[in-house]
């Protein structure tokens, strides 16, 4: 079987599966699929998030109140296929790294309020 046929079959199967679930309940999965994130890129993202989450927990314990450097690091290291704010909100909705995502969202919303 050719690679093209395999790709067509996989694409068809994914379309069928997407009809079975409410993809809007899984915004991060939706981003991964829509942006053709590979397994390697997915794993790299979660390694980055884990590293940032550890730094966040340490900084929080040390009494830090400003975590802007972590957000900047995340945005700078994020795969270019993904948009930082959209990815953060999607990760939050699916429950990944809740404390870190809450801190990031707080900074994003604070910044948005300043612009209004």
Image: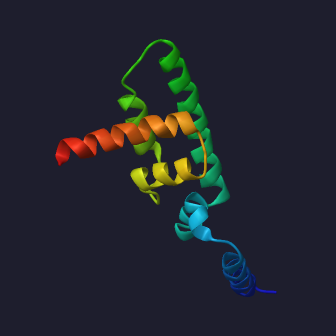
Q: Residue at x 41, y 17 (%)?
A: 64
Measured from the top left, where is residue 115 in percent x and y? 18, 46
Q: Residue at x 45, y 40 (%)?
A: 74
Is residue 102 visible from the viewing direction of this image?
Answer: yes
Extreme residue in the top direction: 62
Measured from the top left, where is residue 89 in percent x and y? 47, 51
Q: Residue at x 44, y 13 (%)?
A: 63
Is residue 79 visible from the viewing direction of this image?
Answer: no
Q: Residue at x 53, y 63 (%)?
A: 31
Visual colour scheme: rainbow
Residue 83 lies left or right of residue 22; in this view the side is left
Extreme residue in the left direction: 116
Q: Quadrant of the N terminus?
A: bottom right
Measured from the top left, where is residue 79 in percent x and y? 49, 52
Residue 67 lies left or right of residue 90; in this view the side is left
Q: Give above or below for 100 relative to 58.
A: below
Q: Quadrant of residue 32?
A: bottom right
Measured from the top left, where is residue 13 in percent x and y? 74, 81
Residue 104 lies left or right of residue 37; in this view the side is left
Q: Give above or below for 112 relative to 14.
A: above
Q: Give above or below for 83 relative to 70.
A: below
- Total number of numbered labels? 0
């Amino acid at each position: 079987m050719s690679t093209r046929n395999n790709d067509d079959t996989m694409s068809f199967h994914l379309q069928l599966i997407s009809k079975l679930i409410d993809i809007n309940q899984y915004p991060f999965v939706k981003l991964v699929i829509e942006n053709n994130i590979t397994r390697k890129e997915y794993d790299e993202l979660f390694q980055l998030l884990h590293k940032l989450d550890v730094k966040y927990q340490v900084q929080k314990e040390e009494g830090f109140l400003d975590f802007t450097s972590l957000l900047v690091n995340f945005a700078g290291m994020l795969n270019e296929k993904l948009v930082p704010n959209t990815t953060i909100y999607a990760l939050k909705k699916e429950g990944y790294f809740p404390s870190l995502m809450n801190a990031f969202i707080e900074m994003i919303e604070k910044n948005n309020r300043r612009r209004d």
